Image: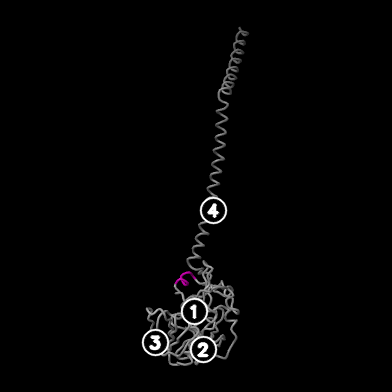
Amino acid sequence: MRVLGLSVLVALRVSSANESALVKCAASDSSPDEVTLLQGARRVDFHQAVAEKSEEEVASEEKEAESEELSSYRRRRRNGDAHCRRRRACSHWAPDGPVDGYVKTDSSSAIYWEKDGRKHYVGRCNQCPDSDACSSYLFVSNSHMDALPSGQAFDCSMLRAPGYIKTDSSDAIYWQQDGRKHHVGRCNQCPDSDACSSYRFVSNSNIDALPSGQAFDCSMLRAPVTHPSQCTGGGYLTGDGTGGHESSIGTANSPEQCLTMVRDQCPDANGATISRRGDGPCYCEFGMTGVDSARRNWQSCRFH
């Protein structure tokens, strides 16, 4: 009886072990690929999620950096580098207001000579032997440049046009005339001319190139017009002078020479007229008030 019971117990244990082995074998034989694929898929999903998150973070950082850089660039362009000009950190930026000298914008290679509210295109850097335009210009904003009407092309005699000048790096004010600088003692030195509200900024190199002359005196303000850039509007205007009367004083070889003739022969004249060709009969204009632009064969200059 004991032997029978023991045999049954052994048989049951063997059967249970065989069933467990068979189950394991069956499980192992029936779905090894499914298990492997599931585990692999989970690993792929995990790595892919990590990679996607990393890519998103990188893209976000790049986008943020690009946005910041673009915004900074747009601010600089929109404000004309206002920070630079406000702090005077950039020596080539002109102060706000009119400029008397070479100017250009940061967005164009074109250089102009600004004088009396007009811009005059400069053909080349070394156009004048004693003044290099490409190393003497001041930066101005696009809006400043766009607001300036165009005058005649720049020529070297414009460098010698009379007027109050100063640099941004010094409080000294000078009167420029005939290629020299004349130190101005005080703002209200002349009753009808306030130097401190009438000066124009020039670059350091421009003012350094001017030799010093005698101290400024008020008689220099009455110096006659000697160059077209001193005409109202910054140059000769197409048309014949109107108002008052005119007087022929001979033949001139250039508009500049006509001005010299008017200065010498008609001290009371306030304008000059010459042929549109630039040579021919020269006329003194007395009481000139404007220009008849319909008469296109002539060009006229009205003095300030």
Q: Nearer the viewer, mark 4 or mark 1?
A: 1
Quickly name the residue at label 1: 115
Sooner in the amino-acid sequence: mark 3 or mark 4: 4
Specify which label sits upstream in the sequence, 2 or 3: 2
Residue 103 forms part of the magenta stretch: no
Asked if the residue under mark 3 is in contact with the one under mark 2, i.e. CB atoms within 8 Å, the reply is no
Q: Nearer the viewer, mark 3 or mark 1?
A: 3
Q: Residue at x 41, y 90 (%)?
A: 247
Marks 1,2: beta carbons within 8 A: no
Of the numbered discs in the image, which one, if any, rests on residue 186? Answer: 2
* Spot occupied by residue 159 in the image (x, y as percentages of width and height): 54, 81
Q: Secondary structure at mark 3?
A: loop
Disc 4 and disc 1: Cα gap in Å? 46 Å
Report the residue at 51% width, 59% height from top.
70
Amino acid at pointer 2: Arg
The residue identified by callout 4 is 62
Question: SS class of the residue under badge 2?
Answer: loop
Of residues 220 and 123, the one drawn nearer to the viewer in this rendering: 123
Q: Is residue 48 above or below residue 204?
A: above
Q: The residue tagged with tag 4: helix, strand or loop?
A: helix
Q: Residues within 10 Å of mark 1 (few under 14, many from 20)?
A: many
Indicate the position of residue 26 as horizontal and vertical percent values.
57, 21
Magenta-colored span? 141-146
Q: Residue furthest top?
A: 1
Mark nearer the viewer, 3 or 4:
3
Which dot marks residue 288? Answer: 3
Q: How many angstroms separate mark 3 from mark 1 (CA)? A: 22 Å
Q: Is residue 29 above or below residue 256?
A: above
Rounded to the nearest angstrom, the CA distance separating label 1 from label 2 is: 23 Å
